[in-house]
């Protein structure tokens, strides 16, 4: 078998091994790739930064554990930023599995990194609500119809952070971390475009391309996949150097991303080269047979 | 649950799923079936406790549900909710051949309601405002009247890209001559879009693989 043919017929398991190595080696060696925020990510950071301390922020975790490696870093970066700025954050989810994602933040990150922040005063978990886009619509029309208690069943009136919340427009911004439907698109359609509340957030790399057309008119900013999360983390570290020593997951995971992308580009080039070399070989052989 | 035990279960299931990359095997099948079963059970439990209980049973029998539905105490029953209850039960008639036709009433309501609910929002957000967003100046000037090359170029690419893409999907006239060239440019716009989407998909998949490798690393770290 000639070299071009052997490349084209390479066992797919060898490619799996190469991809596995391209992911694992950077994870072990931990190379740092400096990222700088693009305007579409910077605009989210700037919006959160410019809000006066104590602003009410609505943060919807519209994803489950299957997309957590991409969206958890965004969630952590946003929570760190909003809490550092002193905003009041209401956690919410339109995904049944999102409840667990919120709990990871309220049970693990907040008590460790922000021990002075109290549940019910600085943040609240409003839990999961069924109804997809309809749930958002109901919240915009009459917030208390759908949300009258937190995830544990405590009435909103009994919590200082939500006692004055009667309508969706009482929140100054809506942040959504999206893995599909429902997500940012529905927040734009049913809350942003109707109630005029600024909508922004992040999405997995798979859903990001369909969200870009909403920027900048309907979407203030977007973190697209792990790269977007990494950009937000770098903006956070630049503004608040205290986070320089914190574990920035997206920045750490960009190592495997860069190496794997380079490998895939090389494999695509190699495949094309083998194809064209093989084609000219086949033509030459056919020519000789014809003679 | 004990953290070490969780790490072992996590690692074992990850390895079982990854073993499919070599070839199909009973370990992969076990993990796959377990995943489907657990997901179905989880969604069923969520469906009952987060959909049926607060949205139907809590409205019809508030006194009975006062322990599990916040705000149900002292509320009087809302019998209008019998209508969705009946429609919900009509959906189940699909299980009985003789009465299966009754489920079409409920389905008709769902399809009609969803279409009516979504149409105005999609028309506004995904059509009218999108058209509006494309009506942008091709020459962008700053406050002192200087030409902003980057922004102007970006706007020109956006407008031309939209026009070329639309022309490609305009089938009322044969794509020949000038229209053919614009249509061909439209194909290029689509190809670039698909390429970008593919690149993003690669990023998503590698992110997930990285997450799994980190989990395996944590497991190995707990052993050694």
Image (cartoon, rainbow, N blue to C red):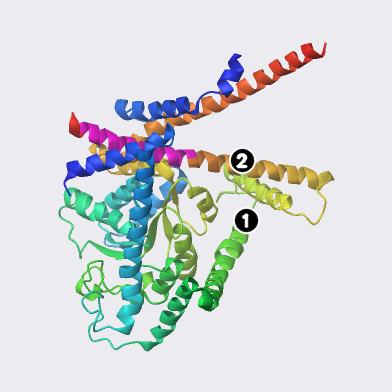
Q: Mark 1 points at which residue?
A: B134
Chain letter of the residue beneath label 1 in the structure image: B
Q: Relative to residue B134, is residue A233 depicted above or below? A: above
Tell me what residue is drawn at x 45 percent, y 52 percent: A221
Which quadrant would residue B136 be assigned to in this image?
Answer: bottom right
Q: Which of marks 2 and 1 is in front?
A: 2
Counting from the top left corner in percent of width and height, residue A201 is at 41, 54
Left or right of B178 on screen, residue B35: left
- Co-location on one chain, circles 2 and 1: yes
Counting from the top left corner in percent of width and height, residue B218 is at 24, 36
Task: Find residue B192 and name its label.
Answer: 2
Q: Is residue A147 magenta?
A: no
Provide the major secondary structure of the magenta segment.
helix
Task: Say which of A105 and B43 sits in front.
Answer: B43
Left or right of A269 on screen, residue A118: left
The residue segment tinted magenta is: B202-221
Q: Is residue B216 magenta?
A: yes
Left or right of A48 on screen, residue A152: left
Tell me what residue is drawn at x 27 percent, y 42 percent: B10
Counting from the top left corner in percent of width and height, residue A160 is at 21, 70
Tell me what residue is drawn at x 38 percent, y 36 percent: B18
């Amino acid at each position: 078998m000639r070299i071009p043919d052997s490349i084209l017929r390479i066992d797919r398991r060898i490619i799996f091994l190469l991809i596995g190595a391209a992911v694992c080696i950077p994870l072990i060696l931990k190379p740092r790739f400096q990222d700088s925020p693009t305007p579409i990510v910077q605009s989210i950071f700037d919006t959160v930064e410019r809000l006066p301390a104590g602003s009410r922020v609505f943060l919807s975790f519209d994803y489950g554990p299957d997309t957590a490696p991409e969206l958890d870093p965004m969630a952590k970066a946003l929570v760190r930023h909003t809490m550092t700025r002193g905003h009041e954050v209401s956690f919410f989810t339109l995904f049944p599995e999102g409840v667990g994602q919120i709990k990871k933040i309220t049970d693990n990150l907040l008590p460790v990194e922000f021990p002075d922040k109290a549940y019910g005063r600085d943040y609240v978990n409003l839990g999961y609500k069924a109804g997809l886009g309809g749930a958002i619509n109901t919240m915009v029309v009459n917030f208390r119809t759908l949300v009258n208690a937190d995830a544990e069943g405590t009435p909103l009136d009994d919590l200082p952070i939500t006692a004055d919340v009667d309508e969706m427009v009482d929140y100054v911004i809506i942040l959504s971390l999206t893995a599909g439907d429902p997500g940012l698109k529905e927040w734009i359609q049913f809350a942003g475009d109707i109630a005029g509340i600024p909508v922004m957030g992040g999405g997995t790399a798979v859903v990001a391309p369909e969200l870009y057309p909403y920027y900048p008119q309907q979407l203030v900013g977007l973190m697209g996949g792990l790269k977007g999360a990494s950009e937000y983390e770098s903006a956070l570290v630049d503004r608040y150097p205290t986070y320089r020593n914190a574990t920035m997951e997206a920045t750490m995971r960009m190592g495997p991303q860069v190496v794997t992308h380079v490998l895939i580009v090389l494999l695509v080039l190699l495949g094309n080269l083998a194809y064209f070399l093989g084609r000219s070989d086949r033509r030459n052989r056919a020519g000789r047979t014809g003679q | 649950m004990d953290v070490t035990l969780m790490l072992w279960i996590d690692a074992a299931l990850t390895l079982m799923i990854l073993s499919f990359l070599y070839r199909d095997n009973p370990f992969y099948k076990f993990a796959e079936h377990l995943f489907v079963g657990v997901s179905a059970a989880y969604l069923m439990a969520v469906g009952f406790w987060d959909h049926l209980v607060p949205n139907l049973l809590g409205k019809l029998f508030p006194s009975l549900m006062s322990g599990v539905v916040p705000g149900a105490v002292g509320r009087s029953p809302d019998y209008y909710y019998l209508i969705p209850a009946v429609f919900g039960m009509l959906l189940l008639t699909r299980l009985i051949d003789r009465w299966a036709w009754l489920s079409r009433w409920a389905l008709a309501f769902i399809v009609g309601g969803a279409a009516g609910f979504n149409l105005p929002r999609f028309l506004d957000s995904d059509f009218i405002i999108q058209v509006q967003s494309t009506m942008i100046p091709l020459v962008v000037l700053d406050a002192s009247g200087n030409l902003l090359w980057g922004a102007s170029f970006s706007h020109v690419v956006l407008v031309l890209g939209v026009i070329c893409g639309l022309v490609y999907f305009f089938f009322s006239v044969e794509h020949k001559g000038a229209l053919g060239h614009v249509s061909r440019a439209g194909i290029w716009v689509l190809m670039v879009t698909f390429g970008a989407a593919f690149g993003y998909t690669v990023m998503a998949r590698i992110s997930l693989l990285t997450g799994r490798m980190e989990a395996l690393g944590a497991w190995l770290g707990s052993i050694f």
